[in-house]
Every structure is written in structure tokens, then in C-alpha cells.
Amino acid sequence: MNVKEELAQKAEITQKEVKLKKSMSISDMIRALQPEIKKALPSVVTPERFIRMALSALNTTPKLAECSQISVLAALMNAAQLGLEPNTPMGQAYLIPFNNKGKMECQFQIGYKGLLELVYRNPAIQIIQAQTVYENDYFEYELGLNSRLIHRPELENRGEIRLFYGLFKMVNGGYGFEVMSRQEMDQYAARYSKSFASGFSPWENNYEDMAKKTMIKRVLKYAPVKIETARALINDESIKLHLSEDMSEVENETVVGEQAEETAA
């Protein structure tokens, strides 16, 4: 069974079947999904604009054409349901070609700004941010019952990246923060990011933003998170091979560990 035959069998969304024919190109399939994309998108993003972004992603990352169509469509549906723009300068979400068990698939990944967008949908969060500390910045922090963090950036000649931190403050006054060195960040990304070594990974061209995203995810462990945000995080760095009204319920097909091998540019 070829990829398009798999797609014809698997791509059913809710009770209303979307007609996807084996003869369709991936671009035609994306256009055919417009009614379902429209239902998933927030009102601030039109389905026409989202379709244009999706087609632009295919043009700017030709390697996506080698991925299974169902994985590309599923990644796009992930982005649509979360209301995040894929593969744009906004840095909200990314479609990444990924060698999964020897087969090219499209991995969906939430960007730093996309994660902030999701977290700020919780009205209980007053502030959440991540920052980069450079060698010549003034920085100190203390842990314990009276924990505190002070960061005074140097205006000029800040030097090399030294560390990162993430923090949050709740409307009720609760707060928390976490700090990681540059070396710790590199080790963490190499171990836990499935696409870290890929030439298509946002770690390649947006290292600082991806490090900040990591800090946000880590500091969220100490913050009350809405169930919608928790479900969104399930979709991060995922490969899905089915379409659903709720993509967080679809199994992640990404192989982890030594079996997974990212594709270089």
C-alpha cells in the first residue's frame, strides 16, 4: 500500500468525511482540508491565510515533499487546532522533515513564541518569560524560602552566552524560576530534542529562541497549567499519522533513542 492509499484510508475527521483522492498532490490535499482547518482555527486567522502559509512551507522546505502526506497534513492540523502559524517569521510552530525509522515523516514542533501564546491564554498567568544572560551581564540568584533573581543586562559588549533562565508570576502573587548554563542547555537539547541535530531543526537557526522555549517548558513544571496547555504540549515534537478533531489524542509515532536518526541538510 502506498502513502496516498494510506492517506485515503486514514484521513477521516469527525463524522464528516473529507474527500481525499489518491491522485491528489499534497498541495491539493491541503486545500481539500480547508473546511476542517477553518473549524479548527481561531477567528484571528483565516483559513485562506493558513493555507497560504502551509503551501509556502512546502516551497521553502522542499524536503517536506519527501515526507508522507499524512504526516504533513497531521502536523498542519496540529498547528491549526492550536492556532499557531507554521514556518513563518513569527516562530510560533515548525514543520520539520524527520527520518523516522528510516521513513521520512513531518514532525510538528511548537516554537518559543508559540509556547508563550499558549501559556498567556491562561488568565491566571501574569508574567512568563525567558531570558539569555551574557558574560558581561550582572546576574545573581538565590534559592530557598526567600528566592530571588536579579539580571542587569550590559548595554554594550555583552560577550558570549553564559546561561538562560525562565520565570513566571501568577496573578495571585505566586512565582518561580529556573536557571540553566549554556553547557547544560546544549546537553539537554542533544538528549531530549528529537530534531536537535537536524539541519532543518529550529535549533540550527533559532538557537536562542529554542533555548528560551526549553526554559519556559521547564519553569511551567512549577506553575498551574490549564488542561488545554498541557494537551498542547503533548503535541510538541510529535509525528502523527492520523487526523482527528483532537490531535492530542492521536498517538505520537516518533521513535526515540538510538533508533531515531534526524536528517541533515
Image (tube, rainbow, N blue to C red):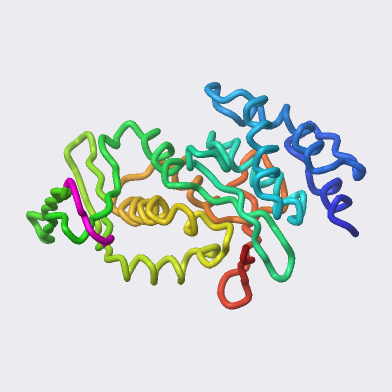
Drawn side of residue 80 relative to residue 90, left or right: right
**Residue at the far left in the pictured view:** 146
Q: Using the image as rendered, state which of residue 112 and residue 119 is in the foreground.
A: 112
Numbered range of the magenta stretch? 155-161
- Image quadrant holding the N terminus, namely bottom right
Drawn side of residue 3 relative to residue 59, left or right: right
Drawn side of residue 147 relative to residue 178, left or right: left
- Image quadrant holding the C terminus, namely bottom right
Q: Position of residue 153 (x, y in %)?
A: 17, 49
Rendered image quadrant of residue 189 = bottom left
- Asked if the stretch drawn in magenta spans residue 183, the answer is no
Q: Using the image as rendered, state which of residue 33 and residue 223 is in the foreground.
A: 33
Q: Position of residue 212 (x, y in %)?
A: 35, 52
Residue under the image location 85 percent in, 48 percent down? 9
Rendered image quadrant of residue 40 = top right
- Asked if the stretch drawn in magenta spans residue 156, the answer is yes
Q: Position of residue 218 (x, y in %)?
A: 34, 57
Residue under the image location 48 percent in, 54 percent down? 205
Q: Main secondary structure of the magenta part?
A: loop
Asked if 79 appears above or below 47 in the picture, the reply is below
